[in-house]
């Protein structure tokens, strides 16, 4: 019998290509309460995220980010894995996921129990000194910012958090915000995240490509693939004659390269797929 539902189609794809590299994007975390950057057409939902060059060169950019982070970071810190995260962890246990490459920085795949994970764009729960390399826990820096900025009032209403711990709020007090500095050298502190305009470390990319070259196929989940750092894996998969399946609500940049496109609910489809493969 031919597969007729998205879950059956995906289960059939995995059965025929049992060793996968999985690439995930923000759509995996939306059921965890973390909004995606883009809509179903691949367009920005709000103003683009902070640029690396701007953050590094402009004090006001750092003030704006760390001030808004007071509202945005707790959403990321307290988020719990969705059914999609749990299902992907189960697929790894079943032996179908050789490597999970995530464009997300929320670490929810690890919380759900996935072990073979590459955080392509870094991790929001750590902060790095861009001068001396010292590292801190994000919550540590968050609490320091709170204590050093008692004059900064957070909005009374709910704010829209962003996937990197930023938030959509504006305040006249931003120019007076005391930006956290490295306790060792006084240097610039930045979440250990690859901001737009910066590059993913080459070693990270090469490690992921090495695994993709050995896999049977590539599965992308919850990503529009508009950012080249993720799209490059689809290009390589085509070059190496690896089939590509995509599960995503909306368009992807790789639609013309896909062997299977599933425009369907992500969590529900992954749960049903996992049940079919047990």
Image (tube, rainbow, N blue to C red):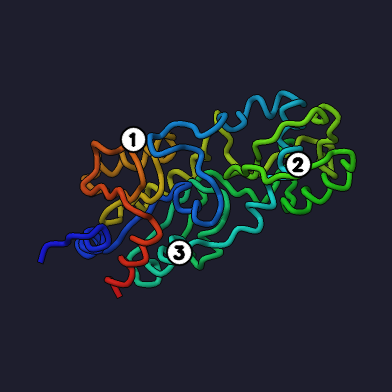
Sort mark 2 into few (<14), some (14-19) or many (20+) by Cα contacts within 10 Å: few
Q: Residue 199: horizontal and vertical position, in percent?
A: 53, 34
**Marked residue nearer the N-terminal end (1 or 3):** 3
Q: CA distance from mark 1 to mark 3?
A: 25 Å
Classify 266 as above or below 271.
Answer: above
Q: Is residue 226 left or right of residue 73?
A: left
Q: Is residue 35 left or right of residue 95?
A: right
Q: Residue 226: horizontal and vertical position, in percent?
A: 41, 34
Dot 2: what SS? loop
Residue at the spot x=68%, y=50% of the render?
126
Q: CA distance from mark 3 to mark 2?
A: 31 Å
Q: Which residue is mark 1?
A: 253
Q: Residue 159: horizontal and vertical position, in percent?
A: 66, 43
Classify 185 as above or below 22.
Answer: above
Q: Which residue is mark 2?
A: 155
Q: CA distance from mark 2 to mark 1?
A: 36 Å
Query: Where is the N terminus found, in terms of image quarters?
Result: bottom left
Looking at the rendered structure, which numbered label has been put on residue 83? 3
**Marked residue nearer the N-terminal end (3 or 2):** 3
Sort mark 1 into few (<14), some (14-19) or many (20+) by Cα contacts within 10 Å: some
Of labels 2 and 1, the one closer to you: 2
**Marked residue nearer the N-terminal end (2 or 1):** 2
36 or 20: which is nearer to us? 36
Dot 3: what SS? helix
Residue at the spot x=21%, y=47% of the render?
259
Of labels 1 and 3, the one closer to you: 3
259 or 83: which is nearer to us? 83
Dot 1: what SS? loop
Looking at the rendered structure, which numbered label has been put on residue 102? none
């Amino acid at each position: 019998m031919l597969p007729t539902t998205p879950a059956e189609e995906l289960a059939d794809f995995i059965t025929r290509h049992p060793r996968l590299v999985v690439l995930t994007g923000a759509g995996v975390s939306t059921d965890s309460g973390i909004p995606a950057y883009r809509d179903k057409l691949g367009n920005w939902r709000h103003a683009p995220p902070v640029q690396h060059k701007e953050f590094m060169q402009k004090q006001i950019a750092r003030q704006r980010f760390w001030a808004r982070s007071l509202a945005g970071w707790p959403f990321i810190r307290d988020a719990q894995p969705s059914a999609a995260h749990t299902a992907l962890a189960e697929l790894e246990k079943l032996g179908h996921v050789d490597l999970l490459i995530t464009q997300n920085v929320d670490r929810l795949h690890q919380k759900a129990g996935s072990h073979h994970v590459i955080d392509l764009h870094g991790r929001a729960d750590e902060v790095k000194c861009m001068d001396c390399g010292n590292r801190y826990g994000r919550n540590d820096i968050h609490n320091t910012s709170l204590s050093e900025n008692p004059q900064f009032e957070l909005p009374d209403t709910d704010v829209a958090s962003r996937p990197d711990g930023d938030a959509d709020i504006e305040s006249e007090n931003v120019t007076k915000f005391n930006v956290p500095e490295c306790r060792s050298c006084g240097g610039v502190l930045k979440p250990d995240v690859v901001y737009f305009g910066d590059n993913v470390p080459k070693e990270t990319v090469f490690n992921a490509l090495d695994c993709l070259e050995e896999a049977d196929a590539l599965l992308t989940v919850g990503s529009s693939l508009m950012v080249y750092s993720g799209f490059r894996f689809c290009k390589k998969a085509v070059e190496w004659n690896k089939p590509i399946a995509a599960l995503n609500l909306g368009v992807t940049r790789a639609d013309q390269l896909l062997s299977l496109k599933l425009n369907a609910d992500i969590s529900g489809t992954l749960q049903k797929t996992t049940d079919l493969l047990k």
